[in-house]
Amino acid sequence: MPSKVSKGQWDIAAIVAIILLALSVVLGGASREHALRLAIVELAALPVLVIGASRLIRSGLWRQHRFALGLLAAVAAIPLVQLIPLPPAVWTGLPGRDELVLALELAGLQPGWAPLSLTPDLTWGSALALIPPAAVFLLVLSASHTLSSRLVGVYMIAAVVGVLLGAAQLASGGERLYPWETTSAGSVTGFFANRNHLATLLLACLPFAAVFGAATLRHRADDRRLALWFGALFMGLVVIGLAAIRSRAGVILFGPAAIASLLAAWVAAGRGRPGPALIGLAGGVAAAVGAVALFALPPILARFDVQSAPEGRFEGWPIVAAAAETHLPLGSGVGSFDAVFRSVEPLEQLDPTFFNHAHNEYLETWLEAGWPGAILILAFLVWYGRRLWSAWRAGPSRERDLQRAASIALLVMLAHSAVDYPLRTATLACLFALCAAILEKAGRPTDRELA
């Protein structure tokens, strides 16, 4: 049986983990122009990484999570392998390097040793950016349910503060209170540079609010009623927040996310006849939806008017796919999307806009990591399916409720990644790691069973 950790040690873990998540929220909301801020988050992640890894090793818990830890190791290995210097005879023969070799010949230079990545500096930066989510994942694997719940609470508080900050941004006339120089000015972005990512945060927190509120049916104490009220108000706030943010993906994903969240709440309430908790949660959502439909529906529908402006990301996807085929089987290097896309973008599509990412994580991974990246995504989906099944077939309990909510949050982020790049931000990457670590415990003994 894994060794137990003293209360004092867990207090240290909670402090460093909460500091890391708070910094990731405040400083990690953009995917570029953030080297100094991201460096602060990465430095804050180092003690969390050391504590999490050491406790997994000392307790022996790592043996229970070998497959998940293997996935994490593979994620870190891809950019590191792409940085290994290769002799000229090797890298010049890789697909997609013809133009680079030709440029060297025209300049009268002989090819020297070079890594697989076309942008080694950006690949190295991408490898360092993995430290915060890896630290969160390792720590939560050895954390108690109480600590995991507190860390989820950090993101729920961040979601509320983000919406309030967004309201202040609108009140300022769309000219102030934006933490990033390159941002969706005039929109509700909160701590993020991209309003779509604030929508992702709200949707990912939705199932946690639902299960925390519904669990009050199993705990009749008066202090538990506060969780019910908070859950209902939070779910209503998500609806109003999404209406103000006007993220098309957020609006589309809200329906499935809300249904799945209420289903998780029903399970948390005991799988019986819907009681006051579930009715209250559904009522909060319904009231908010009604208010939005009454006062803010036309601006939301205007965001779906395809005649007003063409959707650039859809036009760019075939170009990205063709570039990815050129660099198979090993890819162009993690972080190299911008350089590669600029080299193949048709002249007729050049305009003042900046296509900094593919707006499709799966397609961008296909370009940057090739077959190894695609295999890793498939392996992750296999892991997710197995853990999802274990979480949802289990009965209601504090740990299982949290795991079911985490499975929904992960699905929201995976779905949004098909049309955007939320996991390129430190904020959502750490949230993804937190949810993955919680779900990884599905099918494992709970704290109460180990006691």
Image (spheres, rainbow, N blue to C red):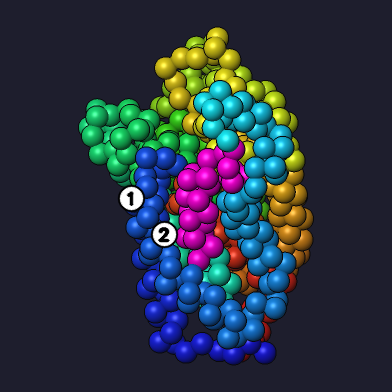
Q: Which residue is painted at 42% across and 72% down in the image?
A: 47
For the residue carrying disc 1, how many other residues have a C-alpha within 10 Å: few (<14), some (14-19), or many (20+)?
few
User: Which of the 4 image quadrants contains residue 322?
Assistant: top right
198, 20: nearer the viewer:
20
Residue 36, labelled with which disc? 1
Q: Position of residue 65 (x, y in %)?
A: 68, 72
Q: Is residue 451 above or below residue 345?
A: below
107, 249: nearer the viewer:
107
Q: Position of residue 255 (x, y in %)?
A: 60, 39
Q: Is residue 41 visible?
A: yes
**Label 2 sits on residue:** 42
- Region rendered in magenta: 111-135
Q: Is residue 274 visible?
A: no
Which image quarter holds the C terminus?
A: bottom right
Q: Which residue is painted at 38% across and 64% down in the image?
A: 44
Which residue type carries mark 2? Answer: Glu
* Lower position in the chain sequence, tag 1 or tag 2: 1
Q: Position of residue 210 (x, y in %)?
A: 54, 56
Q: Is residue 146 above or below residue 246?
A: below
Which image quarter holds the N terminus?
A: bottom right
Taking the image as shown, residue 43 lies to the left or right of residue 177, namely: right
Q: Is residue 37 above or below residue 106?
A: below
Q: Position of residue 208 (x, y in %)?
A: 53, 58
User: Which of the 4 image quadrants contains residue 7?
Assistant: bottom left
Q: Which residue is painted at 40% across and 33% down in the image?
A: 244
5, 49: nearer the viewer:
49
SS category of the residue bearing label 1: helix
Which residue type carries mark 1? Answer: Leu
